[in-house]
Amino acid sequence: MHYQFANRMNHLEGSALRENAKKNMEAKDVISFAYGYPSIDAFPMDTLRTISERMYTEFDPETFLQYGPSEGLPELRKLVKKRIEEQAAIDSDDEVMIVSGSTQAMDLVIKVLCNEGDIVLCEEQTFSGAVNAIKSYGAIPVAVPMNVSEECLDLGALEEILANDSQHRIKLLYLIPTFQNPLGTSIPLEKRKEIYALAKKYGILIFEDDPYGDLLYFGDPIPKMKSFDTDELVIYAGSFSKILAPSTRLGFVMAPQPIFEKLVLAKQVSDSHTNFYWQVLLTEFMENYHFETHVNYLKELYREKLTVMLAELAKLPSEAIRYIEPTGGYFICCELSDEVDEEAFLDYLFDHKVIVIPGNVMSVAGKGYEKFFRMNFTKPSVEEIQLGIQQMNEAIEYARKAQISKAI
Ligand SMILES: Cc1ncc(COP(=O)(O)O)c(C=O)c1O
């Protein structure tokens, strides 16, 4: 049989991240800095077990085994809204919908806003899941150049792109302003305001994707773009994947009312509602089991790992590798200098069972970022971080020699 698929599938490729993750889950003795996974020490097993047992013995099954509203469990929506107000200083009239991971928030937003051929602007290095969501509706992700050392988009380039959009094809600016994936950077407040002003001037919406925002390890938090959204331009999404467990698939989206209503319709078509078992469990956790103490524990756990990774990276030759020190989140992104042959570097690491994500995998164009690679510091143990970065030192040595022989 010759199957004929819909045009929208033409631009989609399997996620290199997911494919590699499958293989590496089976591989032994691998030190993986590759995936954005939480530590296994991060899962609050006792609390989850206690609440689950109570649900099955004390709760009415109707409350967690029955169909429910598409917007999500009303108590959880209230708790999430309150949490965003308290933790992220977002004071907005927008409603919160519980979604199946913030991945679904992106999918629904593109579904309700973009026609085929519409443009979504993205940071040039960004979350590949978002790029795929955009492509899956025939919309076009367009990279805005970054000024990595300033931890921001190149605002001149952004304005030029917006000003040249005479046919008004640009619908949305997709941003990860806080602890960016893959860069680990955070857009400074002044720049956030300038981006917001540009969005307002040119009449485009902003999708503020914030799955890492809770995980601040050093310094002060930077206000979210949603916190100064006086003109209802910002759709704000968050996730419990990084602060509870990814398998719960619990995320949320907050959007101005007219968009919110369309998102609810789109959600009804996609999956009716997000898994109620986990919604009820999280509600209990947030109401009665010190959820914020758990998040603070995670911050301690990951602050230590980040500190170790930075200390190890500082031992590498600074003329060969550079990086921006993140103040939170899950990732550090490194850039190799011209004196290091990137292929030889990655080959050496691979042969020595150390895995990182090459820069091109996390870029809109899929090329041009050969010198970059992303490292996760939350999943590996402290010992793995130390050993893996020692291997990196040797990989640099090896790849410098390879670069010299190439040049001869
Ligand atoms: C920037 C960004 N957005 C969204 C997601 C997806 O999160 P979720 O598990 O909530 O779907 C990720 C996951 O790695 C991410 O890095």
Image (cartoon, rainbow, N blue to C red):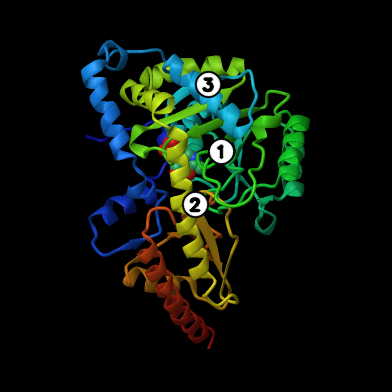
Residue 121 drawn at (x, y percent): 62, 40
Label 3, secondary structure: give it: strand
Can residue 231 be seen here? Answer: yes
Q: Nearer the viewer, mark 1 or mark 2?
A: 2
Disc on the earlier residue, 1 or 2: 1
Amino acid type at circle 2 is Met
Task: Give the side of residue 54 with respect to residue 121, left or right.
Answer: left
Report the residue marked by disc 2: 362
Tag 1–tag 2 contact (CB < 8 Å): no
Mark 3 crowdedness (10 Å alpha carbons): few <14, some 14-19, many ≥20: many
Task: Give the side of residue 254 with respect to residue 223, left or right.
Answer: left
User: Which quadrant is home to the N terminus?
Assistant: top left
**296 above or below 271?**
below
Label 1, secondary structure: give it: strand
Residue 83 drawn at (x, y percent): 54, 28
Report the residue marked by disc 3: 96
